[in-house]
Image (cartoon, rainbow, N blue to C red):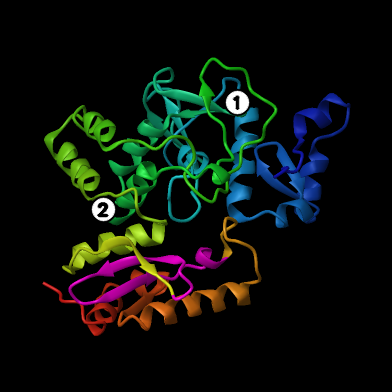
Amino acid sequence: MKYPRLIRAADVRRLGQDPATLARRCRQGELERVYHGSYVTAVEWQQLSRVEQYGLGVSAFNEAVTRPAVLCHASAALLWGLWIVGVPGRTHVVTETRTSGRSTKNIARHVGSLSESIVRCGPFLLTDKLRTTMALISELAFPYAVAICDSALRQPVARQQVNAFRPIGTLPGAEEPSWTTDGPQGPALSVDELRLAAAKLPTRAARNRVNAVINFASGLSGSAGESISRAKMYELGFPAPVLQKEFTLLTGKSANVDFWFEEQNVAGEFDGKGKYLRGDWSGGSMEERVWAEKCREDDIRSQGVRFVRWTWRDMSDRGTFAALLRRAGLPQR
């Protein structure tokens, strides 16, 4: 998408005008402050999603610093289309030494190399997919680390590729990267790549923790909600499901279910709103998509399969999620 043009205090000053007028217009609700000295109109700001607002803030920061910032962690993950949950609260950047500046309310600084494993995406420099993935799975709780790792292993879908990544020395292109994606961007990582990177971690505890995520991860997962669901099933002591089990419908077409528990003859489905809003679905209104999903489920039920469905809210409460799975007939250790 085309992001709003930033209104900068430096540009206003260069034109011989008083930049204090921008702050006054912001207080009056006419402008929205995006970063120090950078504004957009309130109308344009309100038309952006939360992720797009975040991306615009990163752009404003990137243009304000004297040396191009290197994005990392959650900031880089968004451009890679990795499955982070929620919108980051700060812009995450790499700094070479702990004396290069401290983290602030808006900027999180992480010590690391500013030259190795770096790529360009439009006007941004960022850590490459492997480095970004390793940084996050080293720090996040197990279910959320699994979501990152699953998405890094997932084979990209050509029609979902909206961001281009080039070597660090490449000049910025005219393309404007997207902060919202329908799927992971760039080539998938391999398990071997991840294990090799894990072997270089400084402590045995870190290596064990990361390898537990890598060994559990699967590129077959279809979304962050599915990944976190599977990780929480494991933590709660439920059997491991088959992912993306294929069924043949009466029409002769095939349909996959998120989770398949063969012994119990139960199909599990994570119902996130994105399931019905994804841009890669074949058209139709929300009502038509929901109806198609119901018909698909009814067809599979007619084959003797029982279904259990859950939402983000169900999954977020361990007791509720466990009770829901037990009610469906799944055994718990």
Q: Amino acid at mark 1?
A: Val
Q: Which residue is mark 1?
A: 65
Taking the spot 24% from the left edge, 64% from the top edge, the residue there is 241
Q: Which residues are magenta?
A: 250-276
| Residue 85 location, quadrant | bottom left
Q: Position of residue 175 (x, y in %)?
A: 67, 32
Q: Which mark is residue 142?
A: 2
Give whichever of 54, 19 is nearer the camera: 54
On the rendered structure, is 20 left or right of 309?
right
User: In the displayed image of the protein, which residue is found farthest to the right?
Assistant: 16
On the rendered structure, is 29 left or right of 245?
right
Mark 1 element type: loop
Taking the spot 43% from the left edge, 65% from the top edge, the residue there is 254
Q: Position of residue 196 (x, y in %)?
A: 22, 29
- Compared to residue 172, the image places residue 305 above or below, namely below
Question: Disc 1 versus disc 2: distance between alpha carbons?
Answer: 35 Å
